[in-house]
Image: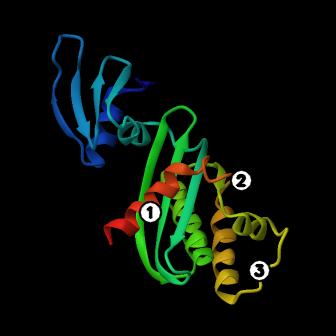
Amino acid sequence: MPVIDCDPDAARTRLDEAGATFAEGNTEHERWRATLGDASAVAYDDQVVVQGARPADVTAVLREHGGRVHAYFDGASRGNPGPAAVGWVLVSPGDGIVAEGSETIGSTTNNRAEYDALITVLEAATDFGFDEIEIRGDSQLVAKQVTGAWDTNDPALRERRVRVRELLGEFDDWSITHVPREVNERADDLANEALDRA
């Protein structure tokens, strides 16, 4: 259960701006309680205790921006080209899963879907204000092309690689690593679940 040292009045303002709902504290020591997404926050004099199924729903709002995040991405295409989807996960060393998502992206190739998944997770990490990012995906082609180890000859992939490099420029430090599918299992599951729902 994360505990955030902070001014409870400032924390209340930030949570209110994020759309949280508030209630009175349950004891004389609790200043207030708040609910946001699948997490709840209990404020004391100089700290906020976060609970719930997804504590990151609150900690992402209350923690100072910056820091390092691990990003996992996966693109899936059934038919190559065929119906495609992306899945992604952001994991903070201190908070666990910060955010995750998936969506269908129409009909495209597997490699294009992999790039689209990477772009989506980079945009999410930028929105959360992380300074450093360690990217992991099971597409060796994307990892090698982004680092420049392999050429990018396909015009559609080249265009996506340019966008990836633009987004990476927003971070103070970044790395991208090709990992086995089992290490990237959650992102892979999310992409396939999106296709199953389509």
Residue 152 numbered mark, or none: 3
Please say if 90 is above or below 112. Answer: above
Which quadrant: the N terminus?
top left
In contact (CB < 8 Å): disc 1 and disc 3: no
Return the disc, 2 or 1, that comes first in the chain's sequence: 2
The residue under label 1 is 192
Query: Residue at image x 58%, y 35%?
Result: 93
Q: Position of residue 65 (x, y in %)?
A: 52, 44
Return the disc, 1 or 3, that comes first in the chain's sequence: 3
Q: Position of residue 98 (x, y in %)?
A: 46, 44
Q: How crowded is mark 2: few (under 14 residues within 10 Å), some or many (20 or more)?
A: some
Query: Residue at image x 62%, y 46%?
Result: 183
In contact (CB < 8 Å): disc 2 and disc 1: no
Q: Position of residue 8 (x, y in %)?
A: 33, 27
Please say if 150 is above or below 28. Answer: below
Q: What residue type is labelled 2?
A: Trp
Q: Which amino acid does label 3 sit on?
A: Thr
Instruction: Determine whether the residue tagged by mark 1 lies in a helix, strand or loop.
Output: helix
Decide which of 183, 162 is in the foreground and name it. Answer: 183
Choose mark 2 or mark 1, whichever is in front. Answer: 1
- How far is the residue under mark 1 from the one under mark 3? 26 Å
Residue 174 numbered mark, or none: 2
Query: Residue at image x 48%, y 82%?
Result: 82
Residue situated furthest front in the rendering: 79
